[in-house]
Image: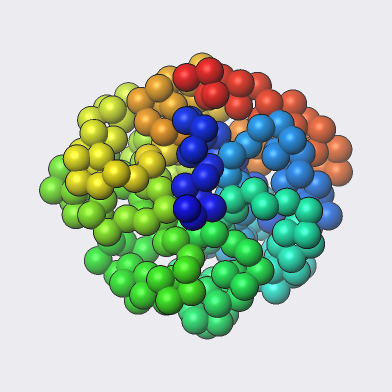
Amino acid sequence: MSNIAKAFEKGKAFIPFITCGDPSLEATEKIVYAMEEAGADLIELGIPFSDPTAEGPVIQEANIRALSGGVTTDKIFDMVVKIRKNTKIPMVFMTYANVVFSYGTERFVKKAAEIGMDGLILPDVPFEEKEEFDCVCRKYGLDLISLIAPTSHDRIRMIAKEASGFVYCVSSLGVTGMRSEITTDIGAMVKLVKKVKDIPCAVGFGISTPDQAARMAGLSDGAIVGSAIVKLCKEYGADAPDQVKAYVKDMCEAVHRK
């Protein structure tokens, strides 16, 4: 069983996201342990990029802060090596095609697999262009996570057929960020995926409260939260690990009750 599949073994998964290096890589490492202790099932590590098109202002600003602080892909790889000495929690990178290209696609994927990452999410790579990354990911045993948006049914079927790891269901069109209301019919999206393939589906974009997380987990296999956690990192800086731990604990309790 893949490490990602294990994240969904116990039923519903809570998946937090953080931008690596915001406020610092030392803090990021501590936040990973704090989130695991709080009950997180899988962690998304964002590799900062100067033009993160899928992100709203909260994560965009975190990217800029991390890059200004001198964060590089290699420094993030070094941090993961340290983290992997202490935990086996499933982890995936979330970044942009350009970050992988400029590092060298094969070099990036090979290194990510070697240091113990389990998957990769590239939100700016459309389904039609994913093969050049997917074939390399398959070669090194890394899951390239597919995203599905509230678009046409035919498209969802097509994406689901080739998906690996889990399917990232984007709850709302537009960029990441907290929303007061999620109106997309997530249940219908998930059913479509499951008809085509037996693969876990987790919902992200716009979730910030335990109620929203519980509702989304009720309609799928898990909830993904980024902006609300990144906001805490900005607000509390070096003290963020304790704040994030308390927040993630509340979110996990809501999701795992489902």
Residue in the picture at 19% in, 54% down: 158
Establish if 20 lies above or below 18: below
For the point 35% across and 25% down, which residue is it? 219
Q: Position of residue 58 (x, y in %)?
A: 60, 42
The answer to which of 195 and 144 lies nearer the viewer is 195
Among all residues in the image, which is located at the extreme front? 1
Could you tell me if residue 195 is visible in this image?
A: yes
Q: Position of residue 41 (x, y in %)?
A: 59, 39
In the visual, does 123 lie left or right of 48?
Answer: left
Q: Residue 52 in the image: state x and y as whole percent.
A: 51, 58
Q: How many marks?
A: 0
Quadrant in which residue 46 is drawn: bottom right
Task: Identify which residue is drawn at 31% across, 30% down.
Answer: 186
**In the image, 142: left or right of 124?**
right
Vertical placement of residue 33 versus 29, above or below: above
Farthest-out residue, left: 154
